[in-house]
Every structure is written in C-alpha cells, then in structure tokens.
Image: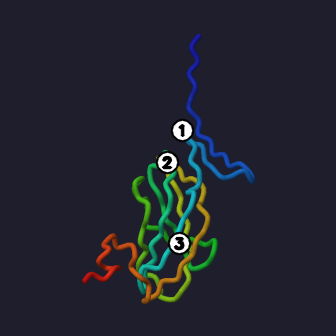
Amino acid sequence: MLVFLKPHFVRAFPGAAGRWLRAEGRILTEVPWVFAVPAGANKVTVYWDGVPGATGYRVRWGSASGNYLNSPGVLSAAARRYTVSGLVSEQEYYFVVEAEYNGLWGPTSEEDSAVPHGGAIPWDTQDPNQIIPTA
C-alpha cells in the first residue's frame, strides 16, 4: 500500500538558545549582526551578515526602538547593505534586518541605531578618492 504525505510547513522558535525558523527542510537563523552608520544629512547605510539559504532580505526601520514601520521591500539574496534616504537629520533611527526564504521571514536581527547628520563621512562610497585626498 502506498501512502502519500502532504508536505507541512512549520514555524518553530526555540527559547533562550537562539532564534531560528524552519521552512521546507531548511533552517533560517536570524541575521548574525547588523550595523547602521550615518551616510549624510538624511541618510543611513545599514550593513549585515548573510544567512545561509536566504533568498532575500528586508531592512526595517523606525524612529522608536522596537517599532519598525518602514521597509524598502525585498532585497536580493546577495545584498549585504542598504542605504536609507529621506530621513530627518539629527533624529535617531532604529534598524533591523530579516532574512527571507521563499516568502517566509526569519527572526528579526538585533537592533542598531544611527543618527543621520551633515558631517557624516561618506566612507562607504567604494571610491577611496572621496575619502583619502590625492596629491
């Protein structure tokens, strides 16, 4: 006798040992680290470490800790940074990153914060000539 089983998808989060999501036989952990840095008068660049098996990422932010009302949508699996623009200068913002696996979202990363300001050094332009004066 043949028995056909339907696949089931389960979300499971352990207690203090860490946070993870199991989906389609894969385990998505939270993004290991997130780092937010001012990138100008109204911009903050958010960096994060990748999660094995992730098919995308989502950066979320807000002006109150734990309250992330904004997101640009799903970023590619190769993304490791995102610049948020249109922010109010000298106001603190809070950022988290989530990994996606085919439409399911893993746990939220730890939170980081940054204050955009006009004196921010554009150290992530990937053009060293903008940072280091040339003779």
Amino acid at circle 3: Trp
Name the image quarter holding the C terminus.
bottom left
Judge by depth and name the residue closer to the eye, 95 or 74: 95
Which residue is found at the position 47% from the left and 47% from the top? Answer: 102
Residue 101 — which label?
2
Comes first in the chain, label 2 or label 3:
3
Tag 1: residue type?
A: Glu
Q: Image quadrant of residue 76?
A: bottom left
**What kind of element bears circle 1?**
loop
Q: Does the CB distance between marks 1 and 2 fall below 8 Å? A: yes
x then y, percent, for residue 25? 56, 36
Question: Residue 88 location in percent, x, y?
Answer: 47, 86
Residue at image location 40% in from the left, 54% down from the top: 78
Quadrant the N terminus occupies: top right
CA distance separating discs 2 and 3: 21 Å
Q: In the image, residue 10 lies at what x, y percent?
A: 62, 41
Q: For mark 1, what is the residue? A: 24
Going from N to C along the chain, the mark reached first, 1 or 2, is 1
The location of residue 54, given as percent across then percent down, is 48, 49
Asked whether the beta carbons under mark 1 and mark 3 sit within 8 Å of each other, the answer is: no
Q: How crowded is mark 1: few (under 14 residues within 10 Å), some or many (20 or more)?
A: few
Nearest the eye: 135 or 108 = 135
Is the residue 71 above or below the residue 29 in the image? below
Residue receiving disc 3: 61
| Furthest residue toward right | 16
73 shown above or below 36: above
